[in-house]
C-alpha cells in the first residue's frame, strides 16, 4: 500500500488495481484492502469505494465523527473526484457532459446500464487531455456516484475504456484491465476543517499503455 497521508482522523492511500476494497464474494480468503489497512492501523471506516480493477486515491476515516463528516460531503457531492481514463476512438468533442440515467447491478455480470425509463439521475463531465491516433486520454469528473458510472458513461458516448471488456471494448494487449485511475480527490478535512487535495501518480500498467500509444 502506498500511503499518501495519515493523521488521527483520516488515512489517504493509492489503491492498487486488482485489490478489492472488501472481501470478494467468491474468494473470501483472498486479501482485501480494508483488512490490510486495519492490520496496520486498527479500526477504519469506509467512506467511498473504487472498483477492484480501478487504481488511485481513496480516503478512509479513523473515527466515527470523521466518518460522519466525510459521508456528508460525499453525499452532497462536495468532495471532488477526478479520474483519468484511456478510451477507444477519438471523440469529436473536447469537453462533454454525459447525463444518461443509470440502472445498476443488471444481470449475472452485475453490469450498470443506461435506462432512460427506470434509471437514476447520473452525470459525468469529460475533458480531453491528450489525443492519440485511435485513443484519447480523458479527465472524468463524476457529479453523482453510481457504480461503474465513468465506465458506462464513456461507453454510452461511444468511447469505451481501453481494456473494458465488460462494456464492449475490443481485446487489447495494451493493458489487462479497464484503463481507469482515480487521479485526485479533494475534500474538507474533517478535523482541521480546511480543504485538502491528494493526487496519485499513474500506476505502471497505465503509464506503459500511454507510452505504447505514443509509438
Image (spheres, rainbow, N blue to C red):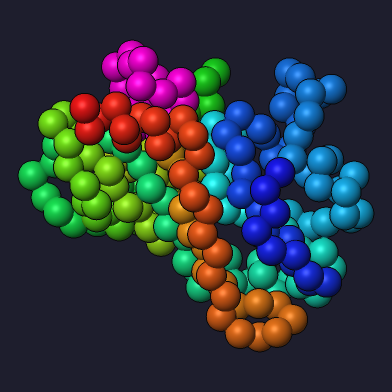
Residue 169: quadrant of the picture: top left
**Which of these two is toward me, 113 or 165?**
165
Number of numbered discs? 0
Q: At which x and y percent is residue 14?
A: 61, 49
Q: Is residue 80 above or below residue 115?
A: below
The magenta stretch is: 157-179
Principal SS element in the magenta part?
A: loop
Would residue 170 appear left or right of 76 to someone viewing this image?
A: left
Q: Residue at x 29, y 17 (%)?
A: 170
- Location of the C terminus (image quadrant): top left
Q: Residue at x 61, y 29 (%)?
A: 18
Q: Residue furthest left?
A: 92
Would residue 203 appear left or right of 114 to someone viewing this image?
A: right
- 95 magenta-colored: no
Would residue 65 appear left or right of 181 to someone viewing this image?
A: right
Residue 52: quadrant of the picture: top right
- Location of the N terminus (image quadrant): top right
Q: At which x and y percent is residue 156?
A: 26, 37
Q: At which x and y percent is residue 2?
A: 67, 48
- 177 magenta-colored: yes
Q: At which x and y percent is residue 103?
A: 44, 39
> Could you tell me if residue 172 is visible in this image?
yes
Q: Is residue 121 above or below residue 79?
A: above
Amino acid at each position: 500500500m502506498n500511503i499518501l497521508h495519515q493523521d488521527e482522523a483520516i488515512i489517504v492511500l493509492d489503491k492498487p488495481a486488482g485489490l478489492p476494497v472488501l472481501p470478494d464474494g467468491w474468494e473470501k480468503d483472498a486479501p482485501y484492502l480494508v483488512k490490510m489497512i486495519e492490520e496496520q492501523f486498527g479500526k477504519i471506516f469506509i467512506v467511498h469505494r473504487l472498483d477492484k480493477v480501478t487504481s488511485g486515491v481513496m480516503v478512509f476515516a479513523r473515527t466515527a465523527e470523521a466518518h460522519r463528516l466525510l459521508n456528508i460531503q460525499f453525499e452532497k457531492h462536495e468532495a471532488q473526484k477526478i479520474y483519468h481514463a484511456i478510451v477507444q476512438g477519438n471523440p469529436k468533442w473536447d469537453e462533454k457532459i454525459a447525463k444518461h440515467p443509470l440502472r445498476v447491478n443488471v444481470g449475472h455480470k452485475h453490469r450498470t446500464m443506461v435506462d432512460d425509463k427506470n434509471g437514476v439521475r447520473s452525470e459525468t463531465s469529460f475533458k480531453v487531455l491528450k489525443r492519440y491516433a485511435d485513443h484519447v486520454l480523458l479527465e472524468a469528473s463524476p457529479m453523482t456516484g453510481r457504480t461503474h458510472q465513468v465506465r458506462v458513461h464513456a461507453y454510452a458516448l461511444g468511447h469505451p475504456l481501453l481494456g473494458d471488456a465488460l462494456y464492449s471494448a475490443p481485446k487489447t494487449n495494451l493493458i489487462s484491465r479497464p484503463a481507469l485511475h482515480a487521479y485526485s480527490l479533494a475534500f474538507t478535512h474533517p478535523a482541521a476543517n480546511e480543504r485538502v487535495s491528494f493526487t496519485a501518480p499513474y500506476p505502471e500498467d497505465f503509464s506503459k499503455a500511454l507510452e505504447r500509444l505514443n509509438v
